[in-house]
Amino acid sequence: MSRLKPILYLLLILPFYGGKAQGQSNLIRAEQQKLHFVKDSIDYVNSINRLGMLYHMKDVDSSLYYGMMAKDLASKLQYPKGKADADNVIASVLYIRGLYQESLQLYTEALSAYKVQKDTSNVSQVTMNIGNVYMSLGDTAKGLELFRQVMRTGRTDSIMSLVYANYCMSNSNLSDDSTQYYINKTRKIAASYKDYRVLIAVKELEFDLLLKKGHNTEALKLLGSTLAEARKYELDDQEIYLLSSYTTFYKNQPDSALHYAWRSYQLAKKKDYVLELIPILKNILSYTQLSGNKDQIISVQQLLESAMAEENEKLKKFVGDYIKYNTIQRDNTVLSLVNKNSKTKIVLLIAICVGGIFLLLFIYRLYQISRKHQRELEQLNLKVVEQNKTLQVNDEFKNKLFSILAHDFRTPLISTISIAGLMKDNPEFTKAEMEQFYGDIERQASGMLESFDTILQWIKQQLSGYQYKPEVLVLHDLFGESAAILKQQLDAKKVTFSNQIPVHITATSDKEMLQFVNRNLLSNAIKFSPEGGTIVISCGQDGNAITVSVADQGQGMDEQTISKLFSVSSNFGSSTQHGAGIALSMCKDFIQKLGGKIWAKNAAPNGAVFSYAIPSTV
């Protein structure tokens, strides 16, 4: 679960303005209004540079636009500081886009210019930003050394509050006491300049320190007061980061973490902090996956895909704008050197080649970033496809089940209607024939009733589930009750029912579930028993397990049939076997819910034995 880090971006903005805290949107509007009344060219360049830096968190394309405009005007005016400030803006945009090497090159150029101008404040600021680039490149030692280099100057101006804060945030090896030391120094300098934005960032560092020490109550209280302060000063970007801190605080409570992550996303979306949408959505997706809600996961994945696709398009536009800018700059350089001597022209050609190589490297770098986004989108699409496949498999199972049930009702109904029609159209039938027809209708109706009961049990199981009600059950009596219910079937086929379960054997289980299984096993044994056959019910006890067996004297089954007995399949067999398959699959499910297992095998010399084992006690 990632967490946003606001201080890094503060380092890029604050050197251009300080004092009374204002929301970034308000600062942008104020600077744009001021721009209309600026008459002096130098002031105009400075104002454009400020706009470029203010826009970098909300709209990097606008930030790049103002940076390039400021650099072009500063070059024409031969205004070195304006050009260095513009390089600083452009380098910051390249850094945000992940183009660290290109950013490092421009920062280095700006640093050299500030040193020539003896602008010590901006020397410290750019040195610090270069340190951030090295940290992002994974060279922690180099980055921290650059921070220490600035700290060794002993300066106490506003930039130093950011240096101490950044050093504190980036150095994971600091002890708690050292961390508190740098927090105090940051607060002291920021307070002296009434820099409320940094003061709020300091409180975030204190929040992290309190969490590290395990002072969760104090940390939560501090976070709440800091959030209220950020809202008071309309610091939208800080509010987004503070809501992210709530997500970190509630990382072990996914529902609460998701609540604050969504609030952070909604605020970023509302205030157009587009650069934060993707990391926030990745955070939301991580916590949503913990919930296991497939619909919500797919919804968040779609939002993330959309944000990444939009960001990818913006990246392509950014590349085009920057290449176009470089091309224009190069063309201007060429035009300015046309009238120089041949030696200068040779140097120009070399510079063009170098510029071309740089552009190729730049394009290749952007291509790598674009491919990375594309791979992430493909991975998300694969997840959605897999989830759709799972839903399709479930839907196919339901369709097969409905087809089987429809067939079980349709066949006996057609037969019953045919018999009734035959009786109606032929009144000359004898009494014996009529009685035979009545018997057929009665058997068909009984079969449909049994199927209907099976369906009701299935629906009850799938939709509402059974409430497990354990009670002490005498197994001998249970089969006696089942035999009484099926007495008509036993008598019709003259089947002998032999209940050999000892009367003293009891089990603590759910009667409704167990009787459903007993009735179905006994009913199937009657169906497949020959006329005048015998069905034997036996029982054995081994430790805490009781095994019950129902044996008939039918023809038995082949191995393929046995392998499919306890599952529903569209290829199971006849209509009768369809109904048996549904009932037996439910028997298996019920026995498993009771903590047991069920199986079947052929008996010697003929017949089949269906058995189940359940615990004797709960």
Image (cartoon, rainbow, N blue to C red):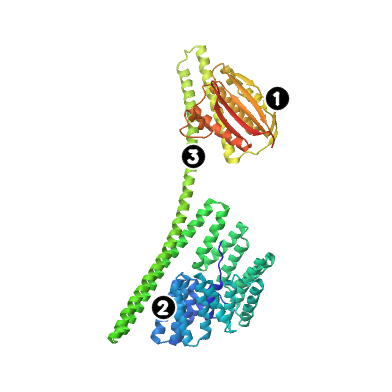
Label 1, on which residue? 503
Q: Is any atom of residue 12 visible in this view?
A: no
Residue occupied by mark 3 = 397
Q: Quadrant of residue 525?
A: top right
Return the disc, 3 or 1, that comes first in the chain's sequence: 3
Q: Quadrant of residue 194?
A: bottom right
- The secondary element bearing badge 3 is classed as helix
Reading the chain from its start, which is encountered first: label 3 or label 2? Answer: 2
Instruction: Report the mark closest to the observer, 3 or 1.
Output: 1
* Disc 3 crowd, CA 10 A, few/some/many (<14, 14-19, 20+): some
Callout 1 amino acid = Val
Distance of mark 3 from mark 1, alpha carbons? 42 Å
Which residue is at a point 37% across and 73% down the rendered structure image? 358
Query: Can you give x and y, in whole percent of width and height, for residue 26 in the image?
Result: 53, 76
- Residue at the (66%, 38%) spot, across then down: 468
Local secondary structure at mark 1: loop
* Alpha carbons under labels 2 and 1: distance apart: 96 Å
Residue type highlighted by circle 2: Met
